[in-house]
Image (spheres, rainbow, N blue to C red):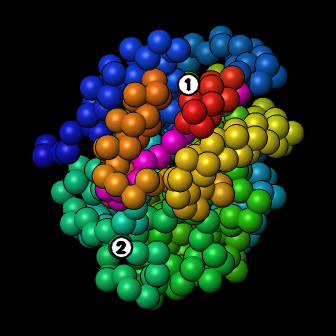
Amino acid sequence: MNLPDFPWDLLAPFGDKARKYPGGFIDLSQGTPVDPTPQFIQNAFSAASNSPSYPVVAGTATLKDAIRKWSIEKLGASGEFDVLPTIGSKEFIALLPTFLQSKKVLYPKVAYPTYLVSALMASAQATAVEIDAGTWPAADLAWLNSPSNPTGQVQTDQELTACINWARKNKSILASDECYLSFSSNAKSILALANGDNTGLIAVLSLSKRSNLAGYRAGFVVGDSKVIDQIRQVRKHAGLMVPLPVQQAMITALSDENHVKEQAERYNRRRQVLKQALLSKGFKVEYSEAGLYIWCTKGEDGYKTVDYFANLGILVTPGAFYGSDNFVRIALTATDESIKKAADRVSQ
């Protein structure tokens, strides 16, 4: 299979340099949570740990009910829709074009690399597009991502509605990666704008960031019942099942929003600390109002900026991984102490 190199393998030399910094290494390259999984979710997982039988691909009735309820209350979903648990969101994103036998796939020009890789894995033609759906060619499948990884940009209602209209006009599938929706005060799900007609629409959600469950691999999709049933049938053959203890943890996590608000506040505090340090040193910060990252530039090649941070003992990600050569992505998934140290080093 002709796939690009795994991007983070290319960071190894910069990581080696950063680890030599006498004040200690700070990894801000990957959006992997470091804050504890809430204890009440851990307890739910542990209580379900005696699970000798295989789970079902569709998920338990209790989990499906919890996802439906949450989707109505938090996503604004209405009309007929179905739900399906996934083993995190990345595996679903990586396999969706294969499940759907897509031949032409659209993805954002500045984007999470797995959208492109998913098309390549399916031997589909992949085309990078701007946010404006009025410029999109016809395709079988198009990806959205709002709030965006890496930029933190939130698409407007008008932009999202234009994407929905494109999907309806072309009888295409519109898959919206909404994994960072909980870290924005104004981002909306495409399902909230569908007026109860979810034909061709799939929202992809994850509990990895909102509930610090990345190690559990807990995600789900919501949307067009026929499309989700088609995907479910393929997943049955592949044995893609979410373990029962994880399903129970998901039910518990979806029942509480306080821990999500607390986590969002943590990331916002970290964002402000690091953003001020970057601005004081002449960095230009674009978007970055939502999600888990700061998207910034010094007006130079991104790898040169990565090297600048490595000399400070900090590892960040070059924008080239996402389709924008002059930027870097800085993750906020580090402890408050580490973010403060990183800000102090940048400010020196």
Instruction: Name the residue: 40% across, 22% down.
Output: 18
Q: Check disc 2 and report its element: helix, strand or loop.
A: strand
- On whether residue 139 falls in the magenta region, the answer is no
Q: Is residue 49 above or below residue 313?
A: above
Where in the figure is residue 168, as x and y percent of width and height?
A: 49, 84
Where in the figure is residue 92, as x and y percent of width and height?
A: 44, 46
Which of the 4 image quadrants contains residue 73? Answer: bottom right
Main secondary structure found in the magenta portion: loop
Q: Is residue 294 visible?
A: no
Q: Check disc 1 and report its element: helix, strand or loop.
A: loop
Q: Nearer the viewer, residue 262 or 329?
A: 329
Part of the protein shown in magenta: 324-336
Q: Mark 1 points at which residue?
A: 215
Where in the figure is residue 299, as x and y percent of width and height?
A: 39, 58
Q: Name the residue under label 2.
A: 129
The reply, left or right, for residue 304 in relation to residue 18 is left
Measure the C-alpha gap from mark 2 to mark 1.
Answer: 32 Å
- Label 2 neighbour load within 10 Å: few <14, some 14-19, many 20+: some
Q: In this view, does 51 lie above or below 68?
A: above
Quadrant where the N terminus sits is top left
Instruction: Name the residue: 52% across, 53% down.
Output: 283
Q: What residue type is labelled 2?
A: Val
Q: What residue type is labelled 1?
A: Gly
